[in-house]
Amino acid sequence: MAMIKEVYRFSELSAAKLYEILRIRNEIFVVEQQSVYNDTDGHDLKALHYTYWQEGDLIAYSRILPPNSVYSLASIGRVCVRKSHRSQGLGRSLFAESLEILENAFGKQPIKIQAQLYLKDFYEGFGFRSITDAYDDCGILHIDMVRDGIV
């Protein structure tokens, strides 16, 4: 099955593609992880939306943000892989490619992320380091992490 990887600016998203993006984020972060939060936070308008499609279905997604949107630093968030496609290395590929897209779009620079605590080792593998203690965000422990601009 061929996978199609695409990057969209918000203005390039069709209603159907935006619906699928919001749907996967809702399925994973709100329903699966039982976290009640405002997913439509206004940052999507400034973001690059990186998608993995397979047979017309959205199976993985990340949101790539320029500096001075969520944080003063550039950021990547809403990183998710549909449950049916986990344990295939897609999360690692998605995040590595998201870092490349961020660098190509906004230049090589420091990056800040908000990470679920259980993924700390995963992000450390990409050169991120924790800058906060664990804190509760909508019922899930998180930490803030940064990666310097030169890795």
Image (cartoon, rainbow, N blue to C red):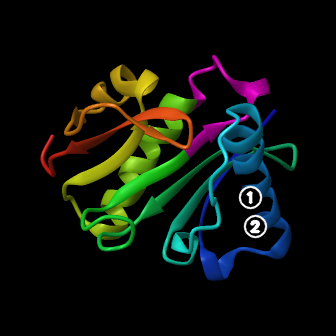
Q: Quadrant of residue 73?
A: bottom left
Amino acid at dot 2: Leu
Q: Secondary structure at mark 1?
A: helix
The relative height of residue 136 versus residue 150 in the rendered view (above or below) is: above
Quarter of the rendering occupied by the C terminus: top left
Q: Residue at x 52, y 66 (%)?
A: 48
The relative height of residue 67 versus residue 50 in the rendered view (above or below) is: below
Number of residue marks: 2
Q: Residue at x 12, y 47 (%)?
A: 150
Q: Disc 1 versus disc 2: distance between alpha carbons? A: 6 Å
Furthest toward the top, the residue is 87
How would you rate the neighbour count of disc 2 (Cα within 10 Å): few for under 14, some for 14-19, many for 20 or more? some
Amino acid at dot 1: Leu
Q: Where does the magenta region start and end?
A: 79-90
**Where residue 141 sits: x, y (%)?**
45, 31
**Residue 88 shown in magenta:** yes
87 vs 139, nearest the viewer: 139
105 vs 43, nearest the viewer: 43
How would you rate the neighbour count of disc 1 (Cα within 10 Å): few for under 14, some for 14-19, many for 20 or more? few
Q: Residue at x 23, y 44 (%)?
A: 146
Q: Residue at x 56, y 23 (%)?
A: 89
1 and 2 marks in contact (CB < 8 Å): yes
In the picture of the structure, the residue carrying the numbered disc 1 is 22
In the picture of the structure, the residue carrying the numbered disc 2 is 18
Quarter of the rendering occupied by the N terminus: top right
**Where residue 114 sits: x, y (%)?**
39, 45
Q: Secondary structure at mark 2?
A: helix
Between circles 1 and 2, the one closer to the viewer is 1
**Where residue 17 sits: x, y (%)?**
78, 65
**Residue 7 shown in magenta:** no
